[in-house]
Image (tube, rainbow, N blue to C red):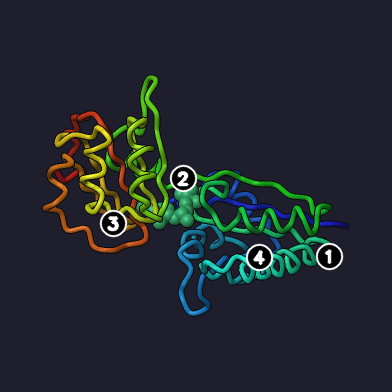
Amino acid sequence: MAGKFIGIGVGPGDPELITLKAVKALQTADIICIPKADVDKPSLAVTMIKPVLADRKVKPEMLELIFPMTKDDISNQELWDKNADVIAQKVNSGKAVVFITLGDPMFYSTFIYLYQSLQTGHPNVELEIIPGISAFNACATSAKIPIAEKDELVTVIPSDLNEKLVEEAAKYSDNLVFIKCAYRLKELIPTLKRSGFKKNSTIAIIRRCSMPNETVTVGRLCDMLNWDISEDYFTIAIVKKNCFINNSKGAVV
Ligand SMILES: C[S@@+](CC[C@H](N)C(=O)[O-])C[C@H]1O[C@@H](n2cnc3c(N)ncnc32)[C@H](O)[C@@H]1O
């Protein structure tokens, strides 16, 4: 009997933000695949699912798959294809194979590459995708500021801080969400000003959202120069063209 492959989003960090559907899949999986950029680095996603697996009598096989973050498309493709082959072989032997990913699997996730390799190389593998709470959604709630309302436009800006591109996108956006590169945002203050953002535009920097060491800083664009924003991969910045009044106690204003 053929098994199944399920890609799961485990949310931003807090195990209580894992959906019931994902919990069910994790509690019945034969094999749980853990994507890792480096063999020696611990996986945050594994820490998150520990409470969900705690009561399982029969423990699942934990299968680490290496996905290095390199800019070499050809060797990356080879690795994704190799990982897809491993998964297809397990599924074809009748196993329920789950792949965990932070946040949502269809939003800037390693899962997407694996999914494409599977679709190309193993189109007969039965596949399901379970959404997760994306970090940017969770960050907006931690900062207690809305990502968008009414007819506002939102743009998500990932890594590579191409100033010209940011300037153009920002011109037409009411709200910007910076991921991967958020800790470098100070460099972009002049660009944002050229795009219509003002001194009192609201900015929120959220680090390690929903994790025990979460920090939230909310204030005005002009305040940001005084903030200490050291490098941390798990950082998101939400910048609103307008000034949004936030009196929440959880935020540093
Ligand atoms: C490769 S993307 C993964 C996005 C993920 N699939 C999602 O739906 O949230 C990684 C980036 O997401 C953001 N991120 C993920 N988890 C986060 C968290 N708990 N707190 C703050 N930012 C987070 C960071 O900007 C990080 O650089």
Q: Which residue position is annotated with label 1? A: 93
Mark 2 crowdedness (10 Å alpha carbons): few <14, some 14-19, many ≥20:
some
Q: Amino acid at mark 3?
A: Tyr
Identify the mark nearer the N-term, 4 or 2.
4
Q: Above or below — where is 26 with respect to 165?
A: below
Distance of label 1 from label 4 (alpha carbons): 24 Å
Task: Name the quadrant of the N terminus.
Answer: bottom right
CA gap, disc 4 and disc 2: 25 Å
Ligand 1 within 8 Å, label 1 CB: no
Which residue lies at the image location 13% right of the left edge and 42% below the top edge? 222
As drawn, the label of residue 183 is: 3
Query: Within 10 angstroms of label 4, few (less than 14), some, or many (20 or more) residues?
Result: some
Q: Quadrant of residue 194?
A: top left
**Which of the two discs, 4 and 3, sits closer to the camera?**
4
- Cα gap from disc 4 to disc 3, whole angstroms: 29 Å
Farthest-out residue, right: 1
The yes-or-no answer for disc 3 within 8 Å of ligand 1 is: no
Secondary element under disc 3, as helix, strand or loop, is: helix
Q: Nearer the viewer, residue 133 or 190?
A: 190
Residue 147 percent location from the top left of the image: 35, 34
Q: Given the image, on which type of amino acid does mark 4 rest?
A: Gln
Residue 193 pos. (x, y %): 21, 38
Task: Report x, y in % for residue 7.
Answer: 64, 52
Which residue is rendered at x = 26% and y = 32% of the image?
A: 241
Identify the residue position indicated by label 4 in the image. Answer: 77
**Residues tagged 1 and 2 counted as in contact (Cβ below 8 A):** no
Task: Say which of marks 4 and 2 sits in front.
Answer: 4
